[in-house]
Image (tube, rainbow, N blue to C red):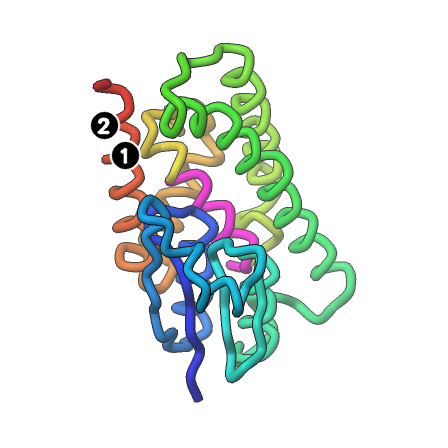
Amino acid sequence: MTIDFYYTPGSSPCRNVLLAAKAVGVDLNLKLLDLMKGEHLAPDFVKINPQHCVPTLVDNGFVLLESRAIMTYLASKYGKDDSLYPKDPQKRAVVDQRLYFDMGTLYQRFGELYYPIIFGGAPYDEEKAKKLDDAFKFLDGYLGKSEWAAGGNLTVADLALVASVSTAESCDWDVSKYPNVAKWYAKCKTTIPGYAEANQAGADKFKGMYQAAKSK
């Protein structure tokens, strides 16, 4: 069995998948793509993924894009039980909602604020920062009602959200302002399997990119 994973380590969505793979105990055949060199536009990769984006998973010929879809696929197919991605419709719906919240609110607002700074040299935008602050407050509210993001145990929702939170922190976002997030975040670091290798190393790389952009 070979599961190829095309990725770049600084990417939060790529780290989502690395965390999910660690959590379910699946070894990925890592295929690093340097986006700055345009390796994602190489004909061989475009043939696999015409959208030429990362992350991209190829599981014995089955191609899947979008990090959160990949995470739920890995948990559904390779998870030892359904704790990471519940089969119960209501519990699963909460996990899905948190994943969509991460994709469409938290991570999106992070990108809207920081990507123009890092990749376009734009100034810090206080209005966009306010929207990201609101997103963190929403997450703080969720975590005020349950130990983990989607209930009483670790799920793929936590893995996606912690990648976003750690990336924001790598850009000097003050996570300590949100007490429930800060408590959960500290627990994630010590509880999630392979956290340092699968997530923190990439977040540190992203931090370097942010610091380099700030110094220009």
Quadrant location, the N terminus:
bottom left
Which residue ends up furthest to the front in the rendered image? 43
For the residue marked with disc 2, what is the amino acid? Ala
The residue drawn where x is 52% and y is 69% is 48
The circle on residue 209 is: 1
Q: Which residues are magenta?
A: 154-166
- At mark 1, the secondary structure is helix
* 105, 33: nearer the viewer: 33
Residue 116: percent from left, percent from top:
44, 24
Magenta stretch encompasses residue 157? yes
For the residue marked with disc 1, what is the amino acid? Met
Q: Badge 2 is on which residue?
A: 212
Residue 187: percent from left, percent from top:
38, 48
Quadrant in the picture for residue 141: top right
Residue 88: percent from left, percent from top:
74, 68
Residue 159: percent from left, percent from top:
48, 54
* 167, 93: nearer the viewer: 167
Give the overall secondary structure of the magenta segment.
helix
